[in-house]
Image (spheres, rainbow, N blue to C red):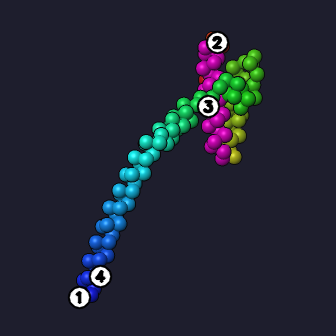
Amino acid sequence: MAAKILANLIVMGSGILARALVQAYRQALQNASKSGVAQETIQNTMRRASKTMTEQEARQILGVAENTAWEEVLQKYDTLFERNAKNGSFYLQSKVHRAKECLEAVYKHEGSSPTG
C-alpha cells in the first residue's frame, strides 16, 4: 500500500514539474520577445550569414595584387587549396575557395576572361 502511494506521488510530482518547466519556458520566450533579445539574435545571425568576402580580403588570402593575371590567381589558388587539403585545414581551404570565387566574379566583371 505504501508503494502504491509513493508511486502515485512520484507520477503526480513529475507531471507538475513538467508543466511548470513548460510554463517557465513559454514565459522566457515571451520575455525575450518583449525585450527584443530574440529579434537581436536573429539580426546578428543574419548579419553573420550575409557577410561576403571583399575583394581586398580575397586578394590578401591568395596573396595577389590588383594587376595580377587570372592565370596567376588560379596558380595561387591551386597551390593553397592543395596545401590545405594535405594538412587537413578545412577552414583555410574554404577561405581559399571563397577568395577564388570572389576574385572570379571581379575578373568576369572586368572582362579578364576567368576560365577554369
Identify the amino acid type marked 1: Met
Identify the amino acid type marked 4: Leu
Circle on res. 53: none
Magenta span contains residue 111: no
The residue tagged 1 is: 1
Q: Which element carries disc 4, helix, strand or loop?
A: helix
Q: Bin the neighbour count of mark 1 within 10 Å (Cα to Cα): few under 14, some 14-19, many 20 and up.
A: few
Foreground residue, 35 or 91?
A: 35
Q: Which of the two discs, 2 and 1, labels the residue nearer the N terminus?
A: 1
Q: Which of the two discs, 3 and 4, labels the residue nearer the N terminus?
A: 4
Alpha-carbon distance for marks 3 and 2? 19 Å
- The magenta segment is 88-109
Instruction: Give the percent coordinates (x, y) of residue 95.
Output: 64, 35
Q: Which of the two discs, 3 and 2, labels the residue nearer the N terminus?
A: 3
Marks 3 and 4: which is nearer the front?
Answer: 4
Instruction: Give the percent coordinates (x, y) of residue 87.
Output: 69, 46
Residue 114 shows in the view: no
Alpha-carbon distance for marks 3 and 1? 70 Å
Marks 3 and 1: which is nearer the front?
Answer: 1
Foreground residue, 95 or 27?
A: 27
The residue tagged 2 is: 110
Q: Is residue 116 above or below residue 61?
A: above
Q: Is residue 2 above or below residue 103?
A: below
Residue that appears at 63% across and 28% down:
53
Foreground residue, 56 or 43?
A: 43
Circle on res. 98: 3
Marks 4 and 2: which is nearer the front?
Answer: 4
Alpha-carbon distance for marks 4 and 2? 79 Å
Circle on res. 6: 4
Alpha-carbon distance for marks 2 and 1? 87 Å
